[in-house]
Image (cartoon, grey):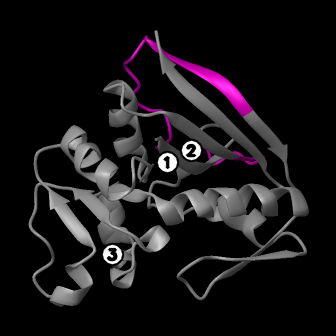
C-alpha cells in the first residue's frame, strides 16, 4: 500500500513555469525509439529503452491506484475529459463545487473532497486497494508534511527553468527521510524513486 507522487522536474527544482506550462520538461516523452502507449488515452510516448521499463511500471501503478489531485490540476486539465489518469476513481481536494456545466457521467469517477488532503487520501486508499497516486505539487507537499506520502518519484530533466512552480516549495516535516530505491538513466532524463520514512 503506497501513496506516491511523481513529477518531471528541472535541475533547479521546478515542475512547471509560472503559467503552468511545462516547456522542455516533457521532451523526453518523445525522445527515444521505444513506443509506450498511455493506458486509457490515445497517446503514445517514444522513449529510451531504460525509460520505457520505468514508465510502464509507473503506469501500472497508476492503473491500479486511486488518484488524488487539487482543483487547480483538475481545472487545468479540464478534468481529463471525465477520464482520470489510470482510469480509476479520482478525488479532488477543493473548496468549490463541481463545474456546473459538466454532464453527470463525466463527474461519476470524481469525488470532490471539501475537508482537506488527509480526508481525500483516506477516501482514496480503499478505492485504490491501498495505493494512491498524488498529482499537483501543493497536494504532494501537504501529504509529505502530514506524514502521508510513502514515495517520491522525480523525472529529473537537465534544464533550468529559472522560475515557476516548485516540487518542494513548502516542506515542513523534519521527520521525513528519503531512502533511495531506484535510479534509472534515460535519454534526456534521470528517473529517481525514493521511499519516504518518518523518524
**Percent of width and height locating residue 43:** 63, 83
141 with respect to 75 (left or right): right
| Callout 3 secondary element | helix
The image quarter in which residue 190 lies: top right
Q: Residue at x 75, y 36 (%)?
A: 182
Q: Residue at x 31, y 26 (%)?
A: 146
Q: CA distance from mark 1 to mark 3?
A: 22 Å
Frontmost of labels 1 and 3 is 3
Q: Residues within 10 Å of mark 3 (few under 14, many from 20)?
A: many
Task: Read off the magenta span.
Answer: 156-181
Q: Which residue is mark 3?
A: 79
Q: Residue at x 79, y 59 (%)?
A: 53
The tag on residue 164 is 1
In terms of depth relative to the viewer, which is nearer, 48 or 170?
48
176 with respect to 36 (left or right): left
Mark closer to the chain start, 1 or 3:
3
Frontmost of labels 2 and 3 is 3
**Percent of width and height locating residue 65:** 45, 57
Amino acid at each position: 500500500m503506497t501513496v506516491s507522487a511523481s513529477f518531471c522536474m528541472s535541475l533547479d527544482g521546478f515542475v512547471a513555469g509560472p503559467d503552468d506550462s511545462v516547456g522542455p520538461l516533457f521532451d523526453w516523452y518523445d525522445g527515444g525509439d521505444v513506443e509506450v502507449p498511455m493506458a486509457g488515452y490515445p497517446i503514445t510516448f517514444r522513449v529510451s529503452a531504460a525509460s520505457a521499463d520505468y514508465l510502464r511500471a509507473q503506469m501500472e501503478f497508476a492503473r491500479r491506484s486511486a488518484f488524488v489531485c487539487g482543483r487547480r490540476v483538475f481545472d487545468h486539465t479540464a478534468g481529463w475529459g471525465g477520464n482520470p489518469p489510470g482510469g480509476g476513481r479520482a478525488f479532488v481536494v477543493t473548496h468549490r463545487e463541481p463545474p456546473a456545466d459538466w454532464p453527470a457521467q463525466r463527474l461519476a469517477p470524481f469525488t470532490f473532497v471539501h475537508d482537506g488532503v488527509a480526508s481525500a487520501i483516506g477516501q482514496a486508499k480503499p478505492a485504490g486497494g491501498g495505493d494512491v497516486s498524488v498529482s499537483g505539487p501543493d497536494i504532494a507537499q501537504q501529504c509529505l508534511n502530514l506524514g502521508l506520502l510513502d514515495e517520491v518519484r522525480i523525472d529529473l530533466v537537465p534544464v533550468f527553468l529559472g522560475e515557476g512552480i516548485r516540487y518542494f516549495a513548502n516542506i515542513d516535516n523534519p521527520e521525513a527521510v528519503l531512502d533511495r530505491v531506484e535510479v534509472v538513466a534515460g535519454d534526456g532524463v534521470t528517473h529517481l524513486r525514493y521511499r519516504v520514512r518518518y523518524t
